[in-house]
Image (cartoon, grey):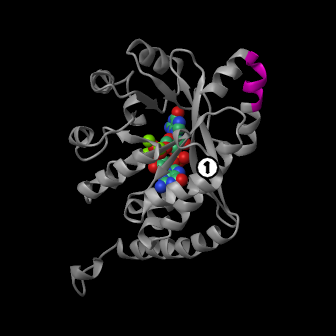
Amino acid sequence: RAKSLGRGKICTYEPSMDEASRIRAELAIDLKRALAGDELELHYQVQNDTVSGGIVGFEALIRWNHPQKGRIPPDAFIPIAEETGLIIEIGDWVMRTACITAAQWRLPFKVAVNVAPMQLNHDLPRRVAEILKQTGLAPSRLEIELTESGIIADRQHALQVVLALKSIGVTVAMDDFGTGYSSLSTLQAFPFDKIKVDKSFIQAVETSAHAAAIVKATLLLGRSLNIPVLAEGVETTRHLDFLREEGCSSVQGYLFGRPMPVEIVNRMIDDEKASRPPATEMREAAM
Ligand code: C2E
Ligand code: MG
Ligand code: MG
Ligand code: MG
């Protein structure tokens, strides 16, 4: 692109663009190795019921521990994984690992897994069904999170994928609601089981009357459509109070916990189980 500016033109950002693409190319090679080795890890962030405060599930979030560069955030490497097609293998790994982990939990919480746009075009329902079968996780305990960007390329096909996933018995959530290209028409066309309001709105509810109005309207919309709404990025008790007052179903954010390594989450679930009266257990077994 920089070249089209023409010979002799001074283009001060060209070297840094080269630098950026060199770093991307390097990361792409490293990512292949990461997948083969054990540099990738899933952390889990708790999701709570807004009213009772009880745990409802955990979202699996990928982490890359690069041997030289340290922890690389998903926003920095998921796009590269998508460009190189590696996201298909990574996505499979994430799905399988999350299902294996959740199948071992001593309480039947849900696990939410993020799915990248490209995965929708690679036989996602069949892969999910296979992984559920192999891991023994009940389909109803898996929630798949889709962002709108995964849907816009081919809405008709995306709809078929969502319907196929739902027919397996997994639930499907719309992630980052409100930041997409046309969130409302997507909501109209797709039978989502949950709406996740993007954290950018939640974090602005105190400082922006507009953000507060948008969150309120989304909660109202969810109620009218009979779709539960989860708020992400809940960091303060004031965020929580606001959401509670406005009738938000569930919440996720640093106020309740950061994404945590699997050992810590497992211990948390063990403690939760130990603290519950036996009667609760029987109800769960009957679920
Ligand atoms: P997301 O799915 O919307 O995940 C929520 C992000 O918000 C996570 O960032 C989480 O750590 C962060 N977060 C949670 N609570 C709070 C809070 O109270 N305050 C703030 N400031 N942030 C909070 P993370 O883990 O860096 O992931 C970023 C994005 O990367 C995710 O956004 C998702 O789109 C993508 N991603 C993560 N794991 C995977 C994966 O396994 N597969 C795919 N395809 N994408 C993934
Ligand atoms: Mg998500
Ligand atoms: Mg999100
Ligand atoms: Mg996001």
| 228 inside magenta stretch | no
Q: Which residue is mark 1?
A: 98
Q: Quadrant of residue 40?
A: bottom right
Mark yes or no: residue 156 visible: yes
Left or right of 158 on screen, residue 142: right
Q: Main secondary structure of the magenta part?
A: helix
Q: Quadrant of residue 36?
A: bottom right
Left or right of 220 on screen, residue 73: right
Pinpoint residue 53: horizontal percent, then vertical percent. Answer: 58, 18
Furthest toward the bottom, the residue is 7
Q: Quadrant of residue 274?
A: top right
Give whichever of 37, 269 is nearer the camera: 269
**Residue drawn at x 57%, y 52% as measured from the top left:** 132
Identify the element where label 1 is drawn.
helix
Pinpoint residue 107: horizontal percent, then vertical percent. Answer: 68, 32
Q: Which residues are magenta?
A: 270-278
**Residue type at numbered disc 1:** Ala
Left or right of 176 on screen, residue 170: right
Mark yes or no: residue 63 visible: no
